[in-house]
Image: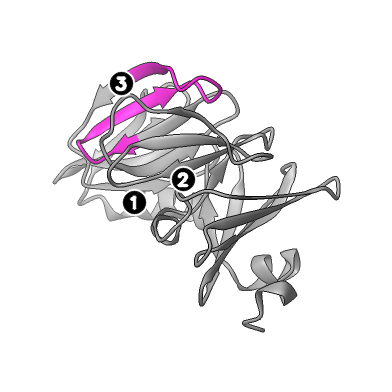
Amino acid sequence: MSNNPTEITYETIVGSGRKSCIGHSTAYLLHIPGHYFVAYEALPILYLWVDLNLNNVTIYYADGSVASWTNRLFDAYITQFGISISADGDYIFAQTWENGLYCISSRTGEKIWRTQSKAAVKNIYVNSNTICINRKDKCLELIAPHTGEVIRERKLTIHEFFAVDTCRFMCRTTVKKWEVIDSNTLETVDTFSADDRDSVRSWFAIFYS
């Protein structure tokens, strides 16, 4: 694979990138020196390219259009967190350790909103009509994607957090307990002991299938 970013294509990212579930879609993350690429399955945005040196973002849409803009939020954070987008492709969500979650227009790079809580956002899970975030202060939030309004909060002692599929994720809520949570409602749909290896394996198998 070439390290020349201008030679990277959608097929290159999907073929060589790291698979990740961002909620409503599967994403593929590819990092080459100074550049970061994310491709998406079955979304209005095919893939985006971030020049980490210039904080420049170029977005390639399924309809053939291209948008390019600069935003300081797109720096080293994205190599830790990845980039999630709304199901309609209109918004990009940028996580930070210091200032919470930002919603940015995919066409212009303009900031649309920022979460009221400035707590670090460890995980983000974007659904068709909601966003679920896992804050570092051990709180889950359900957020309206177009306004940033908090719909619901749920306090948990979260040790680990894994996506399962397009509507569920796993939290290790205590040292000895796992919960499978519906990302649209924050309701628990399954609970099992951390020592129950068969249950842990079966839920992980859903994502890796």
Q: Residue at x 60, y 28 (%)?
A: 128
Q: Amino acid at mark 3?
A: Glu
Give the residue pinned by disc 2.
Answer: 164
Residue 58 falls left or right of residue 78: right
Q: Is residue 139 magenta?
A: yes
Q: Which mark is residue 153?
A: 3
Q: CA distance from mark 1 to mark 3?
A: 25 Å
Indicate the quadrant where residue 118 lies.
Answer: top left
Mark 2 vs mark 3: in front: 3
User: Tag 2, which secondary structure?
Assistant: loop
Give the residue pinned by disc 1.
Answer: 200
User: Tag 1, which secondary structure?
Assistant: helix
Range shown magenta: 134-153
Q: Amino acid at mark 2?
A: Val
Q: Residue furthest bottom?
A: 2
Q: Amino acid at mark 1?
A: Val
Nearer to the camera, 161 or 133: 133
